[in-house]
Image (cartoon, rainbow, N blue to C red):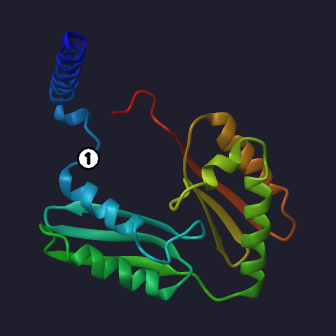
């Protein structure tokens, strides 16, 4: 009986200690404010948002400006409507570009996807509902967007994308994940 009570007290102590450490982290090191977190959460939950789309935003007071490129026009309108419903958002400026319909671009997307994510270790960036590497293809030009763990992964993804025949250019906008980010 004593060991169970001791374990319970130890568990409660660990929870209190963890909560105090989390609370003591300065606000500037926490990942964004609450409005930005809500917007980010809404955007990644969009039904047609995927590896071939790229969405970003900026917040200025209650005005949210949406940026990026999407394959489906419904993703653009869904992003605007879901952002407008968030408490604290008074206005949404939608600057999302709908990529042109093109069987050539569709083929290039698929071939680039296979080339990038078949590289050793890069497959993990395609896992989950919101992949961390996004492949944007517009009129034969490929752009890699997103976040990777290190420079080596960013370079391997870029090299893999450059080996795909038929692309006019490849631009690498992959960012390196910040070490120790809370």
**Viewer-proximal residue, 44 or 98?**
44
Q: Is residue 72 left or right of residue 151?
A: left
Residue 45 percent across, percent down from the top left: 40, 68
Residue 73 percent across, percent down from the top left: 48, 87
**Viewer-proximal residue, 95 or 179?**
179
Image quadrant occupied by the N terminus: top left
Residue with the most extreme front position: 1
**Viewer-proximal residue, 50 or 151?**
50
Q: Residue at x 19, y 53 (%)?
A: 34
Q: Count the marks: how many?
A: 1
Q: Residue at x 21, y 29 (%)?
A: 22
Q: Residues within 10 Å of mark 1 (few under 14, many from 20)?
A: few
Measured along the vertical axis of the image, is residue 49 above or below residue 180? below
Measured along the vertical axis of the image, is residue 113 above or below residue 177? below
For label 1, the residue is: 32
Q: Residue at x 37, y 68 (%)?
A: 43
Q: Quadrant of residue 4?
A: top left
Q: Residue at x 69, y 50 (%)?
A: 123
Q: Is residue 77 left or right of residue 116?
A: left
Label 1, secondary structure: give it.
loop
Residue 49 percent across, percent down from the top left: 49, 72
């Amino acid at each position: 009986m004593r060991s169970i009570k001791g374990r319970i007290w130890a568990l409660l102590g660990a929870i209190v200690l963890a909560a105090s450490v989390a609370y003591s982290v300065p606000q500037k090191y926490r990942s964004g404010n609450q409005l930005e977190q809500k917007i980010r959460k809404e955007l990644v939950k969009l039904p047609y948002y995927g590896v071939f789309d790229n969405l970003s935003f900026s917040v200025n007071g209650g005005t949210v400006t949406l940026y990026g490129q999407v394959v489906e026009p419904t993703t653009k309108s869904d992003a605007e409507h879901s952002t407008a419903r968030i408490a604290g958002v008074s206005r949404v400026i939608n600057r999302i570009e709908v990529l042109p319909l093109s069987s050539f671009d569709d083929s290039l997307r698929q071939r680039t996807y296979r080339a990038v994510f078949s590289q050793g270790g890069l497959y993990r960036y395609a896992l989950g509902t919101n992949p961390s590497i996004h492949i944007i293809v517009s009129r034969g030009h490929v752009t890699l967007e997103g976040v990777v763990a290190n420079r080596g992964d960013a370079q391997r993804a870029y090299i893999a994308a450059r080996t795909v025949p038929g692309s006019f250019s490849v631009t690498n906008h992959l960012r390196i994940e910040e070490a120790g980010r809370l």
